[in-house]
Amino acid sequence: MNTERYIGSHDDQPLRDRFILLAGLAFVGMTVLAGPIRMYLSQSGLSPLIYAPNALLMLAIAWQLIADPRENGFTALHLIALLVPCYALAIGLQFMPPVQVAMGFYVLLPFWFGLACGSVLLERWYLVGRFVPLCWLVVVAGVLANQFIEYPWEGFGYDLGNLDVEGSRLWYANGGTKRLAGFARASFDAAVHVQLAGVLLVLQIRGSLLRLLVWAVTIAAIVPTTSKGVLLAALVLTPIVLLRGALPVSPLRCLPAVVGSIGLALPVSTLFFTFSSPLKDPLLANLTNSFYDRLNDMWPEAWALLSDYGHVLLGRGVGGIGTAQSYFEPVLFNAGDNLFMYWFVVFGWAALPGFALLLLASLRIQPHRNAEEMRVYCLLLATLVYGMITNIVENALSALVFGMVVRLLLSKPAARRYGNDLRVNIRAVPIVVATGGNDVAKR
């Protein structure tokens, strides 16, 4: 462990780390409680405060990018963190107005934060982990109670300048079932919040019976959101988070690369094939309908967006797909709904080597080695499974987590710093994280 990180020669380093932690936790808090916070701030005439945590993220990114290379030396990772956003911004300005590019950059702020500042969050996980049980309780209770309570912020929206902003989405599944969002802005956001908090909490719990109970409640809270992609990710993670070391090592290490390769192949396959559902049963056909919509409509249209309104090799840049389009290019709007498809439109086919590099780097993660590796492994796997049918980088918490994981995968193995083995003993200390006794916790 590099003790200079905490007691070293740079006086502003602990202050910067504390600011990054504050920015990250404030953003998470605003995100998981977005529905009520946005409504009450808007009704009080304080709508600009909604975006204060995003401003903190931007300041944290700037501080880290300026200070870290000066203190630890300029590395290839710093170069990537600087050049990739600049490249995407420069390309975007060739095809779209500056305001659309700025909106696209704003939407991706959580990802940039995770990429630039993820190392700080991982090093100080013994502090971050203490908020996980509380976060899990809030998001799970929000969704489960929503089955019996209609919240006042459901369907709420507000004006910001000339834009009509959705505060909390009220919508229904095809069968007329309301998609529950709890305290979040939308049901799919709530599903992500429940899953991520559930994964992190279960990995911190000692007792196998308590792990099973918490995970069962987590899945039960995902179901009312009707988010099939998050539910699929949770089912894939179930044996991993419950059995942990009992699973064979080699297949487990290969799983993220395999899942990622499938996620990459899905949108690429639409360049060569047309798909039709073989299912005749109406119920099964309805469950897979949105997937075939992606295969036959959304992903082919995203490729057309890249080729007709961008550059096939260089991309369309930030703001060229997703949320920013919905405000400034509604006629061309395409959500992407695949992690790789989204970045293909932003960066063009030039992104393909980067995808391959990340999938190969995922093989370096050894989930059986310690709690840190298992945590990162599960977060990466959840991201890749859900990323097969959504772009995930426009979901705030998924984007932040993905940025953190990418940061770790790009780091040299020798440079990784691992936090202590966090576990929760809820029977002994209710909703308190008991840290291990290693040197990091003592600092």
Image (cartoon, rainbow, N blue to C red):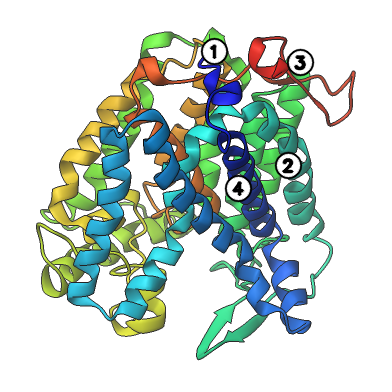
- What's the CA distance linking mark 4 and mark 2? 16 Å
| Residue at position x 75%, y 68% in the image | 36
Closer mark to the observer between disc 1 and disc 2: 1
Which residue, given by chain and number where applicable, does mark 2 sit on?
Answer: 136
Mark 2 is on which residue type? Trp
**So how many labels did they put on this image?**
4
Please name the amino acid that badge 4 sits on: Gly
Q: Is residue 346 left or right of residue 377?
A: left
45 left or right of 313 in image: right
Rendering coords of residue 146 (x, y %): 78, 61
> Whole-Å distance between the Cαs marked 4 and 1?
24 Å
Residue 203: percent from left, percent from top? 64, 24
Element at label 2: helix
Whether residues under marks 3 and 1 lie with C-beta atoms below 8 angstroms apart, the answer is no
Which comes sooner in the sequence, label 4 or label 2?
A: 4
Tag 1 residue: 370
Q: Earlier in the sequence, mark 4 or mark 1?
A: 4
Q: Check disc 3: other Cα within 10 Å, few if <14, some if 14-19, many if 20+.
A: some
User: Which label belongs to residue 24?
Assistant: 4
Question: Mark 3 or 4, which is nearer the eye?
Answer: 4
Indicate the amino acid at tag 3.
Gly
Report which residue position mark 3 lands on: 207
